[in-house]
Image: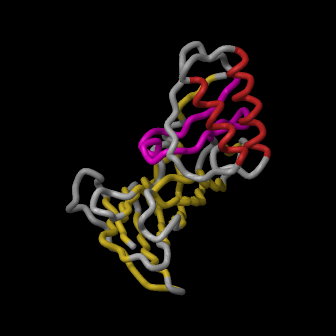
Amino acid sequence: MAFKDVVNVPITKIDTVIEVISKGDGSHERDQVMVSSNLTLTADIDSAEEATLLLPMASEAQQQPIVRYTDEHVKDGVVFKFDPIDRSLNDQELIERLEALADGTGKAEQNKVATQIDRCAAGISSAVVRVKPGQRNLRLFYEIAAPKAEDGAFEFQVIGPLPSFVIQGGGSISLLSILPRATTVESAVGLQNPNDEGSAIEKVEHDIAGRRVIGWFWQVDPLFKVRYRY
């Protein structure tokens, strides 16, 4: 069993919807952020066999390539990062198996991870997805946290697309962010260059059915940051 980075997968289109799930009235420590992306691939992730991918399970992990699981042996400890959010029983069990790998990768631990990855991939999971050769439409669904800052505001950021994917010339990305009721947006920005606050992308904002919806449309790989409070 091994984990390998997936990089430079070309895509022509990505449509993403982010829904923030409220966990309280503002006195709580974090909200849950559900990210759903539909991508149009222009090439196979693997033209020879089905690829099993582990999706981001922490905000930090979005900055790293998606990881591919294989059946090769792992010799050293493997460390994954996880946001403290509510998950399905299947996904939570996988996280517990993956956490155990940080302390060593004996045969028993690796077999437990392999079994749980298969279970997640065969069901509905926000941690594991399988991609077949020739597949051109891919749906990724993962969950991260929107933690509360020291001043009481909540914030999250999403990289679109994830670092494993590269938008080709003429391609585009659309993103909609839906905030909970009874919240006020303090800032919402899409940055063409994540390191340049002056590279903001034009956005649209509307209140729809009592919730604030923010949208962006662009041609390259931006970073989207949203900050709000109750």
Foreground residue, 160 or 118? 118
Q: Quadrant of residue 193?
A: bottom left
Horizontal and vertical percent position of residue 150: 29, 56
Horizontal and vertical percent position of residue 145: 48, 54
Horizontal and vertical percent position of residue 90: 72, 44
Taking 162 as reference, is 226 left or right?
Answer: left
Residue 40 higher or lower than 123, as above or below = below
Q: Quadrant of residue 35?
A: bottom right
Foreground residue, 219 or 108? 108
Magenta includes 211?
Answer: no
Taking 8 as reference, is 40 left or right?
Answer: right
Q: Disc count in the image?
A: 0
Horizontal and vertical percent position of residue 27: 42, 65
Magenta includes 47?
Answer: yes
On-image quarter of the N terminus:
top right
Residue 206 higher or lower than 50, as above or below = below
Taking 18 as reference, is 60 left or right?
Answer: left
Q: Quadrant of residue 206?
A: bottom left
Foreground residue, 53 or 24? 24
On-image quarter of the C terminus:
bottom left
Residue 204 higher or lower than 81, as above or below = below
Q: Residue at x 50, y 85 (%)?
A: 210
Q: Residue at x 35, y 74 (%)?
A: 185
Q: Residue at x 46, y 46 (%)?
A: 62
Q: Colour scheme used in the picture?
A: secondary structure
Residue found at the far front of this picture: 27
Q: Residue at x 71, y 36 (%)?
A: 117
**What segment carries the magenta color?**
45-71
